[in-house]
Every structure is written in structure tokens, then in C-alpha cells.
Image (tube, grey):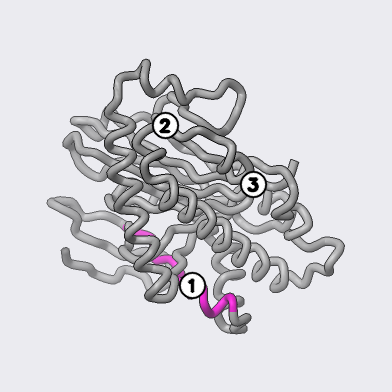
Amino acid sequence: MSQTMVSARSKTTMIVGDRSLDVAVLEVIKLESLIANDPVETTKLLEAAKSQGFFYVTCDNDLSQKISDYLRTCYLNSHEFFAKPLDEKMKAFREGMNDGYKRAGIESFEITRDEQNRTTLPSPFAEHAGATLDLLNICDTIVRTLLRSISDSLGLDESASLQNAHRPDGKSDSGLKFVSGPTKASTADVPDTTHTDGGSITLLWCEKWASQMQTKETKEWLWIDPKPNCVLVNIADYLQSQTGLHSPVHRVSQPSDGVEDRYFVSYFLRPNH
């Protein structure tokens, strides 16, 4: 893969397969520096959340390796689960709930944080419950670290802090979600999934090129590089409404023709009920 810089501020051109893609240049934030309240890193985070609303987060080597191991298990579990007959998957459907199996254009299965110890997981997630739920709780720690840093950088006092709306002991629909992404023989057949995220902060992992974002200023569509050893993060609608940060418009797509497996692992931090 070759790469040519077009702009140090907005995008780069990358050759993926036989195509030249316009790719977003996004900040990379170090989680351990946020935990240490490093002023340079906390400023980078706030500016990224205000500008494009998308950024990457990296973890220290030990945590990064643990997450990578869990993700390998999650992708294998997703492949096995979503390949099941529909009647088998529908046994995990929950009416009127965010969690459980859903089939609305794309297929997904979600485990909410509040229900993680009360939900009967379907196979093969049940056989790997320890790894799955540990990843869920790691994700929750990451998003709460981001939330605290953003709240502090905005200078919100204790009564107005973002943590008040996201208390760990409060009820919410925050959860870990597994998605089987749209994959078509022709890119022209890929359904339009343009949206912003509800909730507050989203984490997203995907091994393949599958996400595009619309820039805040020019509304140009740019591809997002699925960087290894990073998690893609975006601000969602609730934080935009409360703080003026940017909840970006984005979509799931594919850069070239050809059917292939494409799985996403995501975590959604949502405010308390």
C-alpha cells in the first residue's frame, strides 16, 4: 500500500487494492496520557471532538494486546453467529430493546452493560462469555476516561459535569454491539447507511475498509483507515446537544466490488435514563 499526503490537516490519498481513496487524517490520542491528565493530550482530544468528531485512541502495549486477543475471538464468534439460520438468530431477539439480535438492513447482536450478568448469551458468545464481557468492561472504562477528560477540558463544574448523566450506578442502554456489515458484489448495490450516532461516545473496531465520514466544513466524504492497534472513536448526538461538540455524519460502505465478510465490534456509551 502506498500513501501520498494531500493535506496535513484534512486528508491523504491511499491506494487500497486497485483504487485510490481519499482518506481522513485523524488525531491519535493516547489513553494512558489522558489517564495521567497530560495537558497536551487532553487539548488534542477536545479539539478533535470539536472539529471532525472522529479520532483514534491507542492503549499501552499490555491493554492493546489484550484487546487484540479479544477482538480475534469476537470476529470468529460473529462469523459463526451471523452464519446461523434466521430462526436460530431470532431466538436472541428482544422486542423493544437495544440489546439482543436485530435485523434492519444490517444484522447485529448487542449486550448491554446493565444486563451483562443477567442475559443468556447465544452460542458461540456464551462459550466465550469471559472474554466478551471483559472486553465490554474495558470499553466502558475507555469511554468514561474520554468523557471525564472532555468534561474537565470544557471547564464544567461538578454540578454540570458530563459524568452526572453517565453514572455507572445509573440505568442506561450502554452496550457492546457486534455487526455484520453490508457486503455486495457491486459497490452500486451497497445500501445507504448515512447517519449520526445516538448516545454520547462510540468506539468502533473493524479489520477492513468499511467506514466513511463526512467532513464538518466541506461535507466531503472521506474513507477512514482501519488502523491496527487503534480504536476509532466518534462523538455522538447527546454530547453534541449538551456541549456543542461535533457528532459526525458517517456511513458503512465498501471501497470495491466483491462479496466478503465484514464484521464490526462497537461500544456505545449512552446517558442514564
Q: Left or right: 189 with respect to 145?
A: left
Q: Residues within 10 Å of mark 3 (few under 14, many from 20)?
A: many
Q: Choose mark 1 or mark 2, whichever is in front.
A: 2
Query: Mark 1–mark 3 contact, CB under 8 Å?
Result: no
Helix, strand or loop at mark 3: loop
Sequence-wise first label, 1 or 2: 1
Cα separation between marks 1 and 2: 35 Å
Name the quarter where the N terminus is drawn. Answer: bottom left
For residue 232, which quarter of the picture?
bottom left
Of badges 1 and 3, the one in the foreground is 3
- Residue at screen point 39% across, 30% down: 106
Return the mark for residue 29: 1
How far across and down, in percent of the image, does residue 248 sit? 53, 50
Q: Residue furthest top?
A: 87
Question: What amino acid is labelled 3 in the image?
Answer: Arg
- The residue identified by callout 3 is 270
- Span colored in magenta: 23-35
The picture places residue 35, in percent across and down from the top left corner, at 59, 76
Magenta-drawn stretch contains 28: yes
Please name the amino acid that badge 1 sits on: Ile
